[in-house]
Image (cartoon, rainbow, N blue to C red):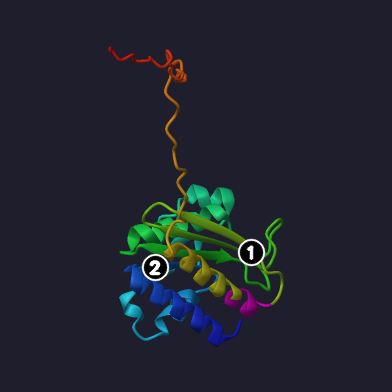
Amino acid sequence: MSASEIRSLARSLLDLCKMRKLMVATAESCTGGLVCASLVDIPGSSAVVASGFITYSNEAKHALLGVSSETLSTFGAVSKESAIGMAKGALKKAKADITVSVTGIAGPGGATPGKPVGLVHFAAAARDGRIITREKRFGAIGRTAVRTRSVVEALKLLTELARGPAKTTKAVKRPAPAAGRLRQRASRKPRQSGGTRRRTSRP
């Protein structure tokens, strides 16, 4: 995706957040602040952007965002669990309504068994309790490309969250039939005529 396309995506997100009066915060590792930068590049972004956390090391993730040491040691920095911890931490630390986190392996080094270059985990959290997670395996497409694609994915996640929860269609409840025996209406029988009475006139 080109720089102009990222700018368009960021502008759309800012417009949506302004309309819905939402503040945004980012928590970034492998993108190093690029998600936040894509937003503040646009004039008027101060009405939407609250904070941007760059937490490249595990120590920073723990100290600045409150990601537990147990989560980092058990699952690793590049994991769904750490991404969720980062997003929740940003929500807690910043005066924001929605947040997004990015943690991954941009390359060319850093790969471990089960975690190849190009693996990126995302999480987006809202103050109303909604959380969206996503895993992307971009492959060894180059450090710059992995980071750029991660910015796009993060902006899309924020947009999805900013739109609000999906509306569910409520089923219309029909009243249950009355309990008990249904009485059938008796059909009315036509009256039988007793015949026509003949009047006789007296002389």
In the structure shown, which secondary structural element does the residue marked by tag 2 occupy? strand
Q: Quadrant of the N terminus?
A: bottom right
Q: Can I make out residue 62 in this image?
A: no
Q: Is residue 123 above or below residue 15?
A: above
Secondary structure of the magenta portion, mostly? helix
Quadrant location of the C terminus in the rendered image: top left
Which badge, 1 or 2, comes first in the chain's sequence? 2
**Image location of residue 4, percent across then percent down:** 54, 87
Q: To which quarter of the image does residue 164 belong?
A: bottom left
Residue of label 1:
136
* Residue at x 36%, y 86% (from the top left corner): 43
Q: Residue at x 68, y 67 (%)?
A: 117
Q: CA distance from mark 1 to mark 2?
A: 21 Å
Q: Is residue 146 magenta?
A: yes
Q: Nearer the viewer, residue 19 or 137?
A: 19
Residue 65 point in image, percent of width and height = 40, 59
Residue 126 shows which numbered tag?
none
- What residue is drawn where x is 38% and y is 15%? 198
In the image, 51: left or right of 192? left
Residue 25: give its label. Answer: 2
Image coordinates for residue 179, horizontal then vertical, percent = 43, 19
Q: Residues within 10 Å of mark 1 (few under 14, many from 20)?
A: some
Q: How many marks?
A: 2
Question: Could one spot residue 83 in this view of the protein?
Answer: yes
For the magenta stretch, what is the residue range?
142-148
What amino acid is found at the position of numbered circle 2 in the picture? Ala
Above/below status of 113 relative to 28 = above
Tell me if 110 is positioned left or right of 67 in this view.
right
Q: Are marks 1 and 2 in contact (CB under 8 Å)?
A: no
Task: Check the image and name the residue furthest to the left.
Answer: 203
Q: Nearer the viewer, residue 23 or 82?
A: 23
